[in-house]
Amino acid sequence: LEQQLRHAQRLEAVGNLAGGVAHDLNNILQVINGYGSLMQMTQAADDPNRAGLAEILKAAERAASLTHSLLAFSRKQVMNPRTLDLNGVVGNVEKLLKRIIGADIRLTVEKDPEPLHVHADLGQIEHVLLNLANNAREAMPTGGSLAIATRTTAIDAAWRDSRGFGQPGPYALLEVRDSGVGMDAETLRRVFDPYFTTREMGRGTGLGLATVYGIVKQHGGYIVADSEPGRGATFQVYLPIAPDPVTPQAAPDPDRDQVRG
Ligand code: ADP
């Protein structure tokens, strides 16, 4: 437990540092991009620096996308939250998910029969789901199964005590379970760390789950991962249940305020 707590605190510290650095870096990149684009626009067609300048701008763009991920990790992202039904979010991306995972992976989707209202940014929650599915696919190079489920759950004192974090209350759960290669304890411990990747050079940035972690945190939620080598992996996203959106009022009852009986 102490180790998990330390890990949570470390992630918090890394997030703060990364957010600060990314913010400053972003300002610098805006200068590079701004003046670079201006130079490009006024550049003569036969300017010998044409290709060089294009490379500089491309690199600056890559750097901007990295700082974007870091800002997301540190929760410094603009949120546009609405009350959403988590089942609807899953429904939105089901087709896309099928395409991401391909024909070798069997997809099952088990949605809670009741709507699961959360106060969330639609694009960000879709991003979380697609990212988790993408990692699952990478973990199943020769096929397997991917199970996505939603249900209501609660964080109670026992849950919090066993993990060292968690605000007790009702939550909507989004679960993504794969039958892939799984993870050893060391990988599991580091999955949400920015820049942690086990993929070969150039194949992974290690920012996927760090970004997911940041998004979930920003929503007041939690994400936990469970896995063993060779036994697949399960990621569970807990999002606080939002009060039901305002439902249309029943037609006013003229007798309502009268004392009866
Ligand atoms: P990236 O995909 O760029 O490596 P992520 O942050 O998405 O970065 O993932 C970090 C690491 O976590 C991966 O390199 C992989 O080792 C491990 N991982 C993530 N999801 C899974 C999964 N579903 N099954 C097994 N390992 C996983």
Image (cartoon, rainbow, N blue to C red):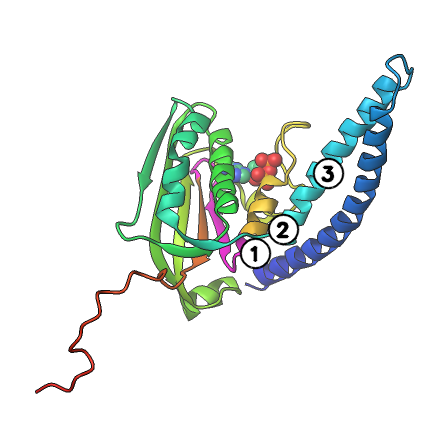
Q: Nearer the viewer, residue 22 or 17?
A: 22
Q: Do the residues bearing badges 2 and 3 touch, measured as CB atoms within 8 Å?
A: no
Q: Residue at x 63, y 32 (%)?
A: 204
The residue that label 3 is drawn on is 64
Q: Is residue 162 above or below residue 78?
A: below
Horizontal and vertical percent position of residue 55: 81, 24
Q: Nearer the viewer, residue 39 or 93?
A: 39
Q: Residue at x 68, y 27 (%)?
A: 202
218 drawn magenta: yes
Which quadrant does ligand 1 occupy? top right
**Image check: 62 left or right of 238?**
right
53 drawn magenta: no
Can residue 191 be seen? no
Q: Residues within 10 Å of mark 1 (few under 14, many from 20)?
A: many
Q: Is the CB–ligand 1 distance for label 3 below 8 Å?
A: no
Q: Residue at x 27, y 64 (%)?
A: 249
Amino acid on which the number 1 mark rests in the picture: Gln
Horizontal and vertical percent position of residue 8: 60, 59
Q: Do the residues bearing badges 1 and 2 touch, measured as CB atoms within 8 Å?
A: yes
Circle count: 3
Q: Residue furthest front?
A: 254
The residue that label 2 is drawn on is 77
The residue that label 1 is drawn on is 218
Quadrant including the C terminus = bottom left
